[in-house]
Image (cartoon, rainbow, N blue to C red):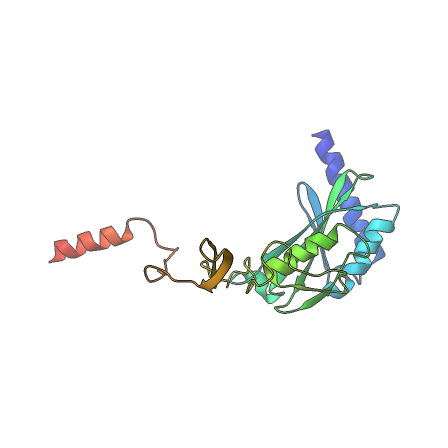
Amino acid sequence: MKEYKNELKVKVNIGENLRLSIPRLIKKVIYKTHYVEIQVEKENLIKVLKILKESSKYQCKMLLDIVCVDCLNIEEIKLGRFKLIYVLNSIYNTTRVHVSTYVENNGIIETTSTLYESSVWLEREIWDMFGLYFEKHPDLRRILTDYGFSGYPLRKDFPLTGYLEVYYDVADKKIIYKPIELMQEYRNYNFGAVWGDYERKVYLENIIK
């Protein structure tokens, strides 16, 4: 219990110090069990990350991950199509700080590779999977999919089947790309329905007859 209180105290100190020192750059501070989240506008992202990294109070010198969330069909879409969460670690404070911002569809955001070298590959992955463009990135290429891949697989509006079928042709000894051919029509499922609703409906219809 004492350790938990100490951890919470560190998080509150970080959040309140940021709120008081740079109030114009901070939109919101959220305290979670294992981290503190700092919400900022994308124009202020680099400034806040630089303060967190270089200030002796915070010393968030490690960028562990960049998480991208597609906000399509959820309430957060009002703030932007994509939510980016930069997961920072401070060995000095033994705590983690999440810096989050929102980017509109087909939006552009500045790379953080000038501050954290680890973001080079992380931003390439987000570009490949979500199509978010990072301005001034030193090497923004696809990293997981093929160079000729069409679309961005982790977007919610990307079809589950994809657009092309890829396979190796033994006879021609080369990789073949061709449009997807399904053996049956793709079914649209109602995920809100409870299992057994259809059977119950048929059973009641038979009773009425």
Q: Residue 118, how many percent across, how many down?
A: 75, 50
The residue drawn where x is 69% and y is 68% is 108
Q: Residue furthest left?
A: 209
- Tell me if residue 2 comes above or below residue 121 in the rendering: above
Figure label count: 0
Residue toward you, 53 or 180 = 180
Q: Residue furthest right?
A: 56
Image quadrant where one finds the N terminus: top right
Residue toward you, 152 or 89 = 152
Q: Residue 77, how many percent across, how many down?
A: 58, 64
Q: Residue 66, how many percent across, how many down?
A: 68, 52
Residue toward you, 165 or 194 = 165
The residue drawn where x is 13% and y is 57% is 208
Q: Does the rendering let one see residue 83?
A: no
Image quadrant where one finds the C terminus: bottom left
Question: Left or right of 99: which side holds 175?
Answer: left
Q: Quadrant of residue 2?
A: top right
The residue drawn where x is 80% and y is 39% is 91
Question: Left or right of 14: which side holds 207?
Answer: left
Question: Left or right of 207: which side holds 105?
Answer: right
Residue toward you, 147 or 118 = 147
- Tell me if residue 105 comes above or below residue 112 in the rendering: below
Question: Left or right of 104: which side holds 61?
Answer: right
- Tell me if residue 8 comes above or below residue 87 in the rendering: above
Q: Does the rendering let one see residue 102?
A: yes
Q: Residue 207, how many percent across, how many down?
A: 13, 53
The residue drawn where x is 62% and y is 63% is 131
